[in-house]
Amino acid sequence: MTILERFADNPIFALLWMLALLISVVLHEYGHAWAAIWQGDDTPTKNGRFDWNPLRYLDFIGVLMFLLIGFGALGYVKTRPDKYRNPVWGSFIVSIAGIVMNIALLLIAALVLLGVDAKAYTLFEDLPLEAVGAVFAGGFAYTAAGVPESALYFVA
């Protein structure tokens, strides 16, 4: 589903989805940059890619492709493996740092969902009557008493 289709379906949820995606992309790329600097490469700092500003990470063509067709490279961090203390292990560490950041984000979201006592249902289950206000994200339906649907959708 492209972002344009999401906007047509529900503009508020589309904006929340974009915000969650932007935060995730920035943290993912920040993980790569931090690992590269830790391995001895100062290229991310010199290129202004070791920053919390999302605009420094985003690739215009990749974002445009993502908006139009639902696929594209949203951001990137350039590094120079020849500057790593150990080019082989440094490359491995820098490449896996983004994945580690994604897993950390997943665990944080899961802890938040557990903290609000959210219930998750697969899309193949019959939802019980208390799940009338369920939000659908990531192949699941989520419900949580007393939590606004928009906040639940953002975390999910």
Image: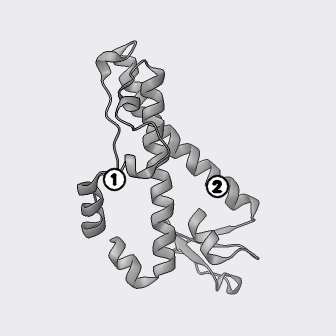
Of mark 2 and mark 1, the one earlier in the sequence is 1
Residue 24 image point, x, y percent: 48, 52
Quadrant hosting residue 130 = bottom right
Disc 1 secondary structure class: loop
Q: Residue at x 43, y 33 (%)?
A: 33
Q: Is residue 156 visible?
A: no
Is 22 left, or right, of 47 in this rendering?
right
Q: Residue at x 52, y 69 (%)?
A: 16
Q: Is residue 132 visible?
A: yes
Residue 65 image point, x, y percent: 24, 62
Residue 93 image point, x, y percent: 43, 26
The residue carrying pointer 1 sits among few (fewer than 14), some (14 to 19) or many (20 or more) residues within 10 Å by Cα, namely many
Specify the label residue 91 is tagged with. none
37 w.r.t. 132: above or below? above
Q: Residue at x 25, y 69 (%)?
A: 68
Q: Nearer the viewer, residue 83 or 119?
A: 83
Residue 112 image point, x, y percent: 69, 57
113 w.r.t. 46: above or below? below
Is 62 left, or right, of 48 in this rendering?
left
Query: Looking at numbered disc 1 in the image, what kind of residue is underneath it?
Result: Leu
Specify the label residue 74 is tagged with. 1
Query: Looking at numbered disc 2 in the image, what kind of residue is underneath it?
Result: Ala
Question: How far separated are the C-alphas under marks 2 and 1?
Answer: 24 Å
Label 2, on which residue?
Answer: 110
Quadrant hosting residue 8 = bottom left
| Colour scheme of the rendered structure | one colour
